[in-house]
């Protein structure tokens, strides 16, 4: 059956789990006209989940499917345009579904943070997905949408300004609040370390900065690219002078996703593009100590885990870690927040800053000036709901919706520009960052602008923004000055 004749637009597979339930809630609240179904192992539990959703979801069909029974996955894949899966760890449960979607020409999106699952998906199903037209979109959650989207938007801005290719690019997690992680997140990390520690080839691959690159030999040699750099803020950007940064636990995965995005676009970011991720540890007199301790602890824990984790009995690990399907309360999720800042320098020396954050105020105003040219634009806060990772579970829903819209266009007019990256494209593609997507040109361009406004509070020349903020400060009262961050409202 061709995608145009499918019964559903989106199937949420794993809807009875913690993340799947939240994803279904997001899609139900969105009130989309998409034809959506819920899938999982138990029809009773699926029915119970459906009863908790918004009234618009009460008629959503239910599909029984099990990762241990590939035939059920194949049957599910042939009925829908897009499968959105939250069933992890993906190393254990994901490949049969990728295989089913690649075979059926069905688009696929997940929340994985597991390097070897991504690598195996690419190696095993890239060609088949290309032949059938399936788009297998990996890592559509907190891993790795903020990273992928921020760098892509910086690249677009540099292209628009004609300031050259990206060179040294650094993402800094400036603030973050989440006191509890979901059991699924813990299971993902555990499974990733178990795979790396039990397979010498996997251990070698996860330590390669280009783990996910299709053609490793074509990648430029840029010297050491450590997963957990310990850096002074001033070494990353002048705006961070006085700060110290340390290793970010999700850096090893996110950096490889971003490097793969560069390779998929024929190194559009640049052949000298270097990318790293760190987390800010403040600017107090203890910050250098915290930087050393945090970086050493994170690097040591993951390094030892990737070498020896398989020696730990699985039952012991399962007993002492949070159970899959569990996560923080709604109140805790609502209180969570994050703020990413991504700095880059181009080949012409121009510097840019992209900021992605959640904020309490609905709108903000930014003024950026360069010579006699002045730009004004309004933007609203990032609309990512906080869930138990704190994964932005709305992103996988948006990714599925984007893929569904793209699939309708693919059926009608042939392959859209969105598929330029191949059968395993970037999360940024499916989230609407490509303004030339032809599914509904006017509507999708509006959607792209909305995504830009939601995801990026500031995208502009970093030095010029700093200068403009300094001029604004001079016109404010001393009380107002004390309340203003140098990084925007």
Image (spheres, helix red, strand yellow):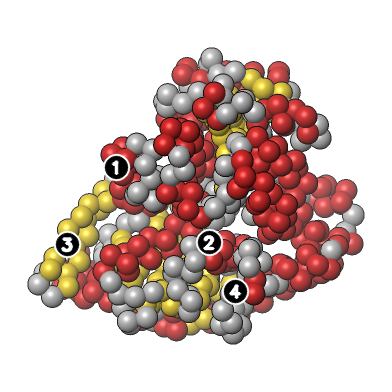
> Quick one: quadrant of the C terminus?
bottom left
Name the residue beneath numbered marker 4. 218
In whole angstroms, how far apart are the C-alphas of marks 2 and 3? 32 Å
Q: Does label 4 or label 1 sit earlier along the sequence?
A: 4
Name the residue beneath numbered marker 3. 375
Q: Position of residue 285 (x, y in %)?
A: 48, 82
Q: Residues within 10 Å of mark 2 (few under 14, many from 20)?
A: some
Q: Residues within 10 Å of mark 1 (few under 14, many from 20)?
A: some
Q: Taking 198 as reference, is 101 above or below it?
A: above
Q: Which of the 4 image quarters holds residue 193?
A: bottom right
Disc 3 vs disc 4: Cβ atoms closer than 8 Å?
no
Q: Residues within 10 Å of mark 3 (few under 14, many from 20)?
A: few
Q: Does label 2 or label 3 sit earlier along the sequence?
A: 2
In whole angstroms, how far apart are the C-alphas of marks 4 and 1? 36 Å
Q: Residues within 10 Å of mark 4 (few under 14, many from 20)?
A: few
In whole angstroms, how far apart are the C-alphas of marks 4 and 2? 12 Å
Name the residue beneath numbered marker 1. 446
Answer with left or right where residue 115 lies relative to residue 342.
right
User: Is residue 336 visible in the rendered structure shown here?
Assistant: no
Q: Does label 1 or label 2 sit earlier along the sequence?
A: 2
Name the residue beneath numbered marker 2. 264
Disc 4 vs disc 2: Cβ atoms closer than 8 Å?
no
SS class of the residue under badge 1? Answer: helix
């Amino acid at each position: 059956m061709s995608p145009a004749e499918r019964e559903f637009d989106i199937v949420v597979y794993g809807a009875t789990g913690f993340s799947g339930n939240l994803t279904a809630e997001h899609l139900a609240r969105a009130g989309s006209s998409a034809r959506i179904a819920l899938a999982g192992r138990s029809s009773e539990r699926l029915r119970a989940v459906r009863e908790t959703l918004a009234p618009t979801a009460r008629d959503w069909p239910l599909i029984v499917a099990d990762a241990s029974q590939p035939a059920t996955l194949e049957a599910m894949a042939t009925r829908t345009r897009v499968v959105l899966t939250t069933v992890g760890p993906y190393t254990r449960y994901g490949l049969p579904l990728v295989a089913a979607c690649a075979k059926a020409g069905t688009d696929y999106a997940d929340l994985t943070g597991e390097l070897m699952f991504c690598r195996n998906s690419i190696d095993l199903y890239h060609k088949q997905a290309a032949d059938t037209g399936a788009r297998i979109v990996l890592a559509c959650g907190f891993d790795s949408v903020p990273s992928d989207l921020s760098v892509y938007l910086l690249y677009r801005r540099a292209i628009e300004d004609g300031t050259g290719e990206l060179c040294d690019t650094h993402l800094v997690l400036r603030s973050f609040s989440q006191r509890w992680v979901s059991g699924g997140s813990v299971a993902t990390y555990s499974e990733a370390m178990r795979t790396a520690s039990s397979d010498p080839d996997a251990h070698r691959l996860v330590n390669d900065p280009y783990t996910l690159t299709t053609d490793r030999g074509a990648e430029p040699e840029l010297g050491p690219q450590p997963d957990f750099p310990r850096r002074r803020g001033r070494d990353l950007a002048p705006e961070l002078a006085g700060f110290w940064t340390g290793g970010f636990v999700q850096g090893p995965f996110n950096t490889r996703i971003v490097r793969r995005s560069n390779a998929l676009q024929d190194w559009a970011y640049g052949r000298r593009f270097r990318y790293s991720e760190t987390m800010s540890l403040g600017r107090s007199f203890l910050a250098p100590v915290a930087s050393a301790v945090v970086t050493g602890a994170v690097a040591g824990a993951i390094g030892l885990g990737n070498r020896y984790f398989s020696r730990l009995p699985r039952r012991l690990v399962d007993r002492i870690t949070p159970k899959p399907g569990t996560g923080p309360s709604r109140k805790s999720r609502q209180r969570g927040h994050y703020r990413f800042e991504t700095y880059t320098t181009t080949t012409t020396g121009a510097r840019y800053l992209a900021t992605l954050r959640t904020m309490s105020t609905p709108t903000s105003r930014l003024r950026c000036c360069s010579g006699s040219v002045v730009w004004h634009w309004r933007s609203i806060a990032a609309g990512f709901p906080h869930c138990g990772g704190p994964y932005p579970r709305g992103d996988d829903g948006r990714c599925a919706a984007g893929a569904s819209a793209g699939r309708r266009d693919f059926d009608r007019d042939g392959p859209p520009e969105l598929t330029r990256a191949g059968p395993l494209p970037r999360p940024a593609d499916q989230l609407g960052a490509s303004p030339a997507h032809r599914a509904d040109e006017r509507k999708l361009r509006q959607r792209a602008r909305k995504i830009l406004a939601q995801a990026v509070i500031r995208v502009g020349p970093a030095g010029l923004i700093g200068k403009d903020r300094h001029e604004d400060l001079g016109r404010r009262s001393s009380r107002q000055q004390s309340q203003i961050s140098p990084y925007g409202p």
